[in-house]
Image (cartoon, rainbow, N blue to C red):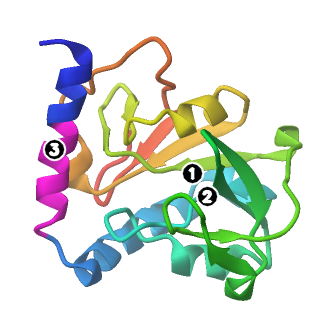
Amino acid sequence: MEIKQEKKELRKKIKAIKNTYSLERKKTYSYPIFERLERTKVFKHAKCILMYWSMDDEVFTHDFIDKWHKDKIILLPCVVGDDLVLRRYEGIFSMVKGERFGILEPKGEIYDDYSVIDLMIIPGVAFDSQKNRMGRGRGFYDRLLKSCKCEKIGICFDFQLVKKVPTEEFDIKMDKVIATSATY
């Protein structure tokens, strides 16, 4: 089977599993992920962190972002055309509905000094024990990730951990993957 078709099938499979979980259950499963993340040395020392404002089918980040944005610089991606730009999260009042996907995004100036980012927390559809990541298929994060040299941690629910993620040359590996009950 061709890699693009393998990815399509895996996305479909994970989506079907996600749909069996309520938003409240996904929120509950998200908390242990952030407890593990907070215990990492890289998180403790990070001053500037790229996160993401979660959609209903992802690890729930809203509470975690709100908890830490006064102590650390939290950057969130905003979709502009085919790319992600970064803006600082200043609180829920700073968020507006994004134009492309309707996801809340911070308003304000674009943050383009990637050298100050200490840590990136990255969503994905699936991850494997080799720290490979598969996204939604548009390449937004892969284009951003290749521009940053900091540590990259993928976060996911346990059912998003698979034996092998089909990969292509442009796919960027994570430095670590934290799931509900596992860390790679």
Instruction: Between residue 153 and residue 166, name the one nearer to us.
Output: 166
The percent coordinates of residue 74 (x first, y second) are 73, 64
Which residue corresponds to the image point at 66% horizontal and 77% vertical from the top-left? Answer: 96
Which of pointers 3 and 2 lies earlier in the amino acid sequence? 3
Task: Give the labeled residue for mark 1.
Answer: 121
Marks 2 and 1 in Cβ contact (< 8 Å): yes
Which residue corresponds to the image point at 36% horizontal and 34% vertical from the top-left? Answer: 134
Label 3 vs label 1, nearer the camera: 3
Type of amino acid under label 3: Lys
Tell me the quarter of the picture where residue 149 sits. top right
Task: Give the labeled residue for mark 2.
Answer: 51
- Can residue 162 be seen? no
The region drawn magenta spans 10-20
Q: Classify mark 2: helix, strand or loop.
A: loop
**Magenta stretch: includes residue 14:** yes
> In the rendered image of this protein, does residue 102 appear above or below residue 172?
below
> In the rendered image of this protein, does residue 178 appear above or below residue 184?
below
Which of pointers 2 and 1 lies earlier in the amino acid sequence? 2
Marks 3 and 2 in Cβ contact (< 8 Å): no
Type of amino acid under label 1: Ile
Q: Is residue 107 left or right of residue 55?
A: right
**Magenta stretch: includes residue 145:** no
Q: Label 2 vs label 1: CA separation? A: 5 Å
Task: Give the labeled residue for mark 3.
Answer: 12
